Each structure stands twice: as structure tokens, then as C-alpha cells.
Amino acid sequence: MKEDRKAIFGWALYDWANSAFATTVMASFFPIFFKGYWTVGSDPVISTARLGMANSAAGILVALMAPVLGAMADRGEAKKGFLLFFAAVGILMTSALYFVPMGHWQAAAACYVLAMVGFAGSIVFYDSLLTTVAAEERRDFVSSLGFSLGYLGGGVLFALNVWMTLSPDAFGLSGSSEGVKLSFLSVGLWWALFSLPLAFLVRERTGGTRKAPAAVIREGLAQLRDTLREIRRLKTIFLFLAAYWLYIDGVDTIIVMALDYGLSIGFKAEDLIVALLITQFIGFPSALAFGRLGERIGARQAILIGIAAYLVITVYGAFIDDKREFFVLACLIGLVQGGVQALSRSLYSRIIPADKSAEFFGFYNMLSRFATVAGPLLVGLTALAARTAGLEGSIASRVGIASVAALFLAGGFVLSLVDEGRGKEEAGRLSGR
């Protein structure tokens, strides 16, 4: 396979484009603004429940759709088309948040759910295009390039959005609320602009005859049914997905619980935002470095190093006392987070059937949607048990976050059993090669 550097650049830049949504909207401004603006005057418990339901609805929708859409895209040779469709949905719905008035939480939640579906749906097809743009021996680096640009792009726009919110006068804005609303619009524009290179530079391989939509749907559903029958024979894929679900649950739990944990042990919100920015900018070069490490020692070994680092991070995090230590923790997370995510994607791409990449990445992303179920529940129940046993609140929170180590231990053990060579043989048999 001849390397097309323009296609690789266009593909990787989509991570730069959509990470603005993950950083500014999902991780930061939407949860805060939902409570303080769109559900102003509501009981905090009720607003939290509404936000939780919105997140759950989006996650379930994507998880259920992903394998089916992936199978349809494989049959219709339409991965890029599906990606751009879902990206357009995400872009429009994110931009629409700018126009939702104060107190209209139903409209805000609806826009957010659809934006989440667009974001996560596009990722299914973005991931599956990795097998199109990169030769097998280059996938560790190319996958890491995407994640590294995602960290940098997401961090750059987030830094600008934070500036707009904290210093609205410098931008001619009436206040912080207008700054946050304008941030949603800026994410939509950023996402749209930097999706254009993928649209024009990435060319999907075709097999000749274009099929009618009804035939694509029918054949896609039949392919999914056949794969569900076959997957029990693909022991390596099954083993990898089990390992991935465990350790990525740990990674995602730290992502979604870090701010709450910091607040629980007494840190200020401003310090936590600085920590998030540190993670973003350190993640840029670190993801690239992990890609090179994966090429040198193998993706599985590099992921295991990252999991070992997460064990250290989890234990260290349970003992931090001041904001400088929290910033050190943010640096450590930035060093390994993108690398573990990127190399997991490239390793998986090598053990799945190439002609069914979108479908199999549908399963992969389905697990990602469900990955933050067990971890936060484990943290919450462990902290609650510690509190019930008589421990002080902040100590109970520390015990809760330390429990995430169990996910990394279990995930690392299962991953150590994965044999990439055997996985390639199994995938080749399923593809008929």
C-alpha cells in the first residue's frame, strides 16, 4: 500500500476538528452551563438527573446504532459519507446551543443529545478509515498522530474559550454567559472548517458497482448477523475487546471523575480547568511519542506500559494534598492518555477483517460508549462504603478513586494474553484470504 501523506494529514486533522467538542462542550462548558443557565432555579439534584439522562440517552443511541451502521457502511463503501453526515449533525446541533434561551433545558438537552450522536457516530467511521489511509506497519504512528492533533486542537480552542469566558470585555461581550454561548458556536465553526481536509483529501477504496440504499441496508444487516455468529470463533478479538473494556473503563473513569474528585478533596474549579489544559497540551507530543514507541516495541507492549503508568497515577492520586500535586497528576495523565487510546485503535485495526473494518469498529466504539458504566459506579460505591464505615468525606473519596486500579490490573492481565499474530490469522480466515 503506497502511503498518501495528504490523505493521512486530512484524516488526522479530523481529530483536531472534533476534539473541540469533546473538550469545550462535553468535558467543560455544557455541564456547567446546563446547571447555571438552562436549568436556573431548579433543584440541583433534578438538574443533575436531567443531565445524566441526556448523556445516557446519547450513549445508548450510539451504542445500539454503531455496529449496524458500520456493517451498512462496509457493504455500501460509504465510510466517509457516513462520517460527514454524522459530523454535519454534530456541527449543526452544537452551533444551535448558541440560540437556546435561558431556562429552556429541554431544547438544550435535545441539541446536546443529537450533537453527541453526531460526534460519536462520526468517530465510528473515522476510526474505520484508519485501515484505508495507513499501511499496517504505519498505523501506530498515524493513529497516534490523530490523537496528538486532537489534544492540540482541542486545547487551543478550549484555551480561547476559557479566555472569552473569564475576560468577556476583551472580546466585546456583555458577560461570561455570552462568552460560553459563543464558545458553542465557535466549536461548530471549528469542527466544520477542519473537517474539510478529510472530505477532500481522503479517498475511500471502492469495489466498482454502487449499490442502491435499500440493498446496502439489507446486505449490511445480513453481514452483521453473520458476524455475530462468527465472532465467537474470533477468540483474539474477543479477548482484546474484553481487555479494552476493562482498561479503557479505567481511563474514561479518570477523565469523567477527575474534576469531581478534585472538588471533593477541596481544589478550586479554576485550578481544575488549568489542570485540564495541562493534560491537553502535554498529550500532544506524548501521543506522538507513544506512536513511535509502538512501532519500536509493538503496540501491545506499549499499551501495557501505559496501563502500568495508570496504576501509578491511580495510587498517587489517592494521596495528593495540594494543587501542585494535582498539576503533577495532570502531567502524568497527559503523558499516557492519548498513547493508550491511539495504540489500542491501531492494534485493533490489525486483528480485524479489513473488509469489515467499519462494522468491527462499530463494536469497538459500542464498548467505548458503555465503558464509563462500571468505573464511576465502582468509584461511587467504594467511596460510599468507606463513608459508611466511618471514614471522613475526603478520605472516602480517595479510597473511591484508588479502586479504579482494579480495572487497570484486570485489563492489563487480559491484554497480556492477546496474541496479535493469531488475531491476524483469524481475521484472514473470516475475510476469505
Image: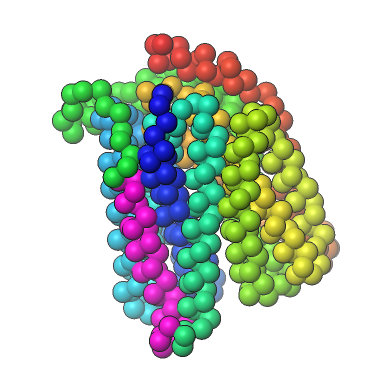
Q: Residue at the spot x=68%, y=75% of the render?
A: 268
User: Viewer-proximal residue, 308 or 104?
Assistant: 308
Give the vertical position of 431 relative to 390 (above or below). Answer: above
Give the tally of numbered discs: 0
Specify the segment rendered in magenta: 171-199
Q: Position of residue 113 (x, y in %)?
A: 38, 58
**What is the quadrant of residue 140 in the picture?**
top right
Q: Residue at the spot x=46%, y=14% of the render?
A: 428
User: Viewer-proximal residue, 90 or 234?
Assistant: 90
Instruction: Locate the N terminus and report the quarter of the image it occupies.
Output: top left
Q: Position of residue 39 (x, y in %)?
A: 44, 76
Is residue 175 inside the magenta stretch? yes
Give the vertical position of 197 relative to 72 (above or below). Answer: below
Question: Does residue 207 appear left or right of residue 271 in this picture?
Answer: left
Q: Position of residue 313 (x, y in %)?
A: 75, 51
Question: Does residue 400 appear left or right of residue 13 in this picture?
Answer: right
Give the vertical position of 429 relative to 325 (above or below). Answer: above
- What color scheme is it? rainbow
**What is the quadrant of residue 418 in the picture?**
top right
Q: Residue at the spot x=60%, y=46% of the render?
A: 287
Instruction: Locate the C terminus and report the quarter of the image it occupies.
Output: top left
- Residue 277 visible from this viewpoint: yes
- Residue 109 visible from this viewpoint: no
Give the vertical position of 108 relative to 126 (above or below). Answer: below
Q: Residue at the spot x=72%, y=38% of the render?
A: 305
User: Viewer-proximal residue, 420 or 259?
Assistant: 420
